[in-house]
Image (cartoon, rainbow, N blue to C red):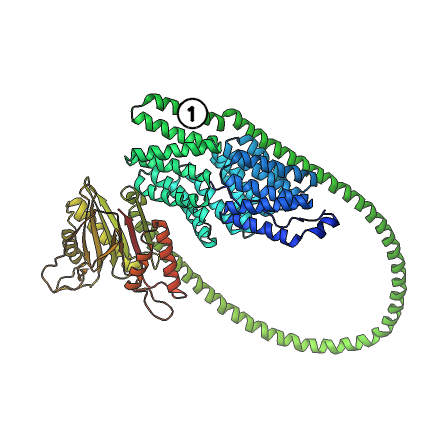
């Protein structure tokens, strides 16, 4: 679910003691009060809610005794935030409204805005979306007037949450995006992390899981950077929802359990109720009905204690389905009625219209404010114009006097110039003589220039011809690249078979000597990854030949045994390239790994020609080296046989196929990345989601490569079974 940021609107730039009496300033150590307030904010940000509440309560008591109204309002604001985070929503509303009353009496706009934002958050959790939006818009208006970019980013995020729960996902994405732009501008890493998580959930709600995972990973990276456990737990819960939507409840259960552990440590009852609902639903899908029923009842109890209609709505729906599946239709109807009542309380046409009216009212008030500001500007401009007209008249008078004086000076200078004219004529004659000499020299220079320009024209014409040749070559290569990429399998082939996967395909040049290939029969699926001799155009031709021959062997000849496919491929490559002993036209060939995956039988069959297979079966690393002979090339033996390896998949397994481009990459010291380092890296990351694994592999390759260029094509495929 969307994280309700604990850190929103805790501005420490408030002038805490601007209006205090001299007696209060003398009796209270203001430095200690400020330090206590900062300590409270830190405890809230780290999830130590009980300690934060105790400190804020003590701060309120001291401020009340000393008559420090502003500090009382700030302490009440923090107490209300802690109660909201712990799920005590009704008590939180009372405390926040008390803080708002004090802020109004002191005209403290920043604290007023903070309270409106937090009151909006509580009403959003209670399902009162119109009131929540009105509070958020009031807070946003004040933050805009104060030019508080940090506060504006937080409020924009919360407005997006309201639209998300009203299922207006495009509107939610608009507000999340505006918040993210501001957070990035002011380099607010916690704010950016929250925006990425919220954008991910909006895409998830729209059914776009791939984009959702991308933004969740961005949010996770920033959250790990700042050590935000709450954010990480939120992302675990959302990843659980994605895997649950794919039907992989066992994998989803692990994410939910990890998320629940953190929220229970933080004592965040609202989040606990959310995750318990997800866990209960997962258990029922996994046929652990009693455990699921117990978790759902606990979630319902917490939701009712909190008073959140949206939580009651979600858990009531799950309980209704549970009783319906177990034939208890009376209980199913009871909980369905509870679900309907909660849904109607949190989401209705009337409330949607109220949201629209609130948004329109806010836009209208903002436009009126802009008009008033523009009118004020015009009045100022009119006053300035009058002052400028007076100044211009004075300046004109001064200019006339100056011009008269200047004319007198000019007349005197004219008389002096007449006297100098005779001398200038004499000098002019001398200059004309020298000018004739210069003209002669100029003609010689122009002749030389014409010769140089002619030579330049010849060079330009040759350069143009070379550029045209290069353009034709590059155009041909780009077209070849398009054809090569078109024959590669599409991503949906892998997503339909495996629960997670990645494909790292990075050619050295425009076209690649690496390729991967797949073919699915009714019972099994064949996968191949090949590294052809050379790269660029030569490697590209070999990859096309390899792809074509695999289709002939498997699709046309219906050979699916990996070892037999390699034997047949070796023969056909040698025939295609005329590599018999009497007429060895070339020694080109390819290294290739082929895997046959039988999902029904639960087995993986592998054969390799100088390419290995790496796998992590449970927590055990297994390497199958493959045979030490390539496909094609120079061959002494009459026939070339390949070994067949069969693996039983009796526990979760992660499999990797790869060419040698990754491990052979040189760094600036001419040292290879190496297969040992690659194995060590895979051992560290194989438990991560595949998208994260791919990111880590690319980062490791770039870090090793440094300023060196890529020396070979790189291809790697990883998939989880």
Which corner quadrant holds the N terminus?
Answer: top left
Total marks drawn? 1
Element under disc 1: helix
Position of 609 relative to 80 (above/below): below
Residue at left 71%, top 40%? 374
Pick the front one: 482 or 88: 88
Pick the front one: 458 or 704: 704
- As drawn, is 652 to the left or to the right of 395? left
Residue at left 46%, top 31%? 304
Residue closest to the far left: 638
Residue at left 38%, top 64%? 705
Report x, y in % for residue 508. 34, 59
Report x, y in % for residue 688. 34, 51
Q: Quadrant of residue 105?
A: top right
Q: Residues within 10 Å of mark 1 (few under 14, many from 20)?
A: some
Q: Is residue 661 visible?
A: no
- As drawn, is 237 to the left or to the right of 407? left
Pick the front one: 421 or 279: 279
Q: Quadrant of residue 249?
A: top left
Report x, y in % for residue 455. 49, 69
Q: Is residue 164 visible?
A: yes
Q: Which residue is mark 1?
A: 338
Position of 443 relative to 129 (above/below): below
Pick the front one: 282 or 175: 282
Q: Quadrant of residue 466?
A: bottom left
Report x, y in % for residue 568. 14, 53
Residue at left 19%, top 52%? 606
């Amino acid at each position: 679910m969307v994280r309700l940021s604990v850190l929103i609107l805790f501005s420490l730039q408030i002038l805490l003691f601007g209006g205090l009496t001299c007696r209060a300033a003398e009796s209270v150590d203001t430095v200690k009060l400020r330090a206590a307030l900062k300590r409270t904010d830190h405890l809230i940000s780290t999830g130590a809610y009980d300690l934060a509440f105790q400190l804020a309560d003590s701060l309120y008591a001291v401020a009340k005794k000393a008559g420090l109204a502003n500090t009382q309002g700030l302490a009440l604001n923090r107490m209300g935030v802690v109660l909201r985070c712990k799920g005590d929503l009704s008590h939180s509303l009372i405390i926040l409204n008390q803080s708002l009353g004090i802020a109004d009496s002191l005209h403290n706009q920043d604290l007023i805005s903070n309270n409106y934002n937090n009151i909006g958050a509580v009403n959003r959790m209670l399902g009162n979306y119109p009131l929540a939006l009105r509070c958020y818009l009031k807070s946003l208006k004040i933050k805009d007037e104060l030019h508080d970019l940090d506060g504006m980013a937080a409020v924009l995020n919360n407005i997006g949450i309201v639209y998300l729960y009203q299922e207006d996902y495009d509107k939610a994405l608009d507000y999340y995006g505006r918040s993210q732009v501001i957070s990035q501008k002011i380099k607010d890493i916690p704010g950016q992390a929250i925006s990425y998580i919220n954008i991910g959930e909006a895409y998830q709600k729209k059914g776009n899981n791939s984009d959702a995972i991308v933004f969740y990973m961005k949010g996770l990276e920033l959250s790990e950077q700042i050590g935000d456990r709450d954010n990480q737990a939120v992302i675990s819960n959302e990843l659980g929802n994605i895997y649950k939507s794919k039907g992989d409840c066992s994998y989803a259960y692990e994410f939910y359990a990890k998320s629940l552990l953190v929220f229970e440590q933080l004592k965040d009852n609202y989040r606990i109720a959310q995750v318990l609902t997800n866990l209960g639903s997962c258990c029922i899908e996994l046929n652990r009905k009693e455990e699921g029923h117990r978790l759902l009842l606990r979630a319902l109890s917490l939701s009712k204690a909190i008073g959140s209609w949206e939580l009651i709505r979600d858990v009531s729906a799950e309980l209704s389905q549970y009783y319906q599946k177990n034939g208890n239709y009376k209980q199913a109807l009871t909980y369905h009625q509870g679900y309907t009542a909660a849904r109607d309380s949190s989401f209705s046409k009337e409330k949607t219209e109220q949201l629209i009216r609130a948004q329109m009212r806010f836009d209208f008030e903002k436009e009126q404010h802009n008009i008033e500001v523009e009118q004020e500007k015009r009045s100022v401009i009119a006053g300035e114009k009058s002052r400028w007209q007076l100044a211009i008249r004075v300046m004109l008078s001064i200019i006339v006097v100056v011009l008269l004086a200047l004319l007198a000076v000019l007349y005197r200078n004219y008389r002096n110039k007449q006297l100098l004219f005779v001398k200038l004529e004499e000098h002019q004659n001398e200059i004309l003589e020298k000018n004739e000499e210069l003209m002669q020299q100029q003609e010689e220079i122009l002749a030389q220039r014409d010769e140089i320009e002619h030579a330049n024209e010849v060079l330009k014409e040759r350069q143009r011809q070379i550029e045209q040749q290069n353009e034709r070559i590059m155009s041909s290569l780009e077209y070849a690249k398009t054809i090569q990429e078109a024959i590669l399998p599409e991503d949906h082939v892998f997503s339909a078979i495996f629960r997670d996967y990645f494909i790292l395909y990075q050619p050295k040049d425009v076209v690649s000597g690496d390729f991967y290939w797949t073919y699915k029969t009714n019972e099994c699926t064949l996968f191949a990854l090949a590294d052809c001799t050379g790269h660029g155009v030569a490697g590209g031709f070999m990859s096309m030949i390899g792809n074509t021959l695999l289709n002939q062997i498997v699709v046309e000849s219906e050979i699916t045994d990996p070892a037999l496919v390699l034997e047949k491929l070796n023969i056909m490559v040698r025939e295609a390239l005329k590599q018999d002993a009497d007429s060895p036209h070339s020694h080109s060939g390819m290294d290739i790994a082929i895997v046959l995956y039988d999902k029904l039988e639960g087995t993986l069959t592998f054969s390799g020609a100088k390419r290995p297979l790496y796998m992590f079966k449970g927590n055990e690393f297994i390497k199958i080296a493959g045979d030490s002979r390539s496909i094609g090339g120079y061959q002494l033996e009459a026939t070339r046989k390949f070994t067949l390896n069969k693996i039983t998949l009796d526990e979760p397994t992660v499999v990797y196929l790869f060419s040698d481009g990754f491990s052979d990459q040189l760094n600036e010291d001419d040292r290879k990345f190496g297969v040992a380092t690659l194995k060590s890296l895979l051992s560290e990351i194989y438990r991560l989601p595949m998208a994260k694994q791919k990111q880590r592999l690319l980062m490791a390759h770039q870090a090793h490569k440094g300023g060196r260029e890529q020396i070979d094509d790189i291809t790697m495929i990883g998939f989880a079974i």
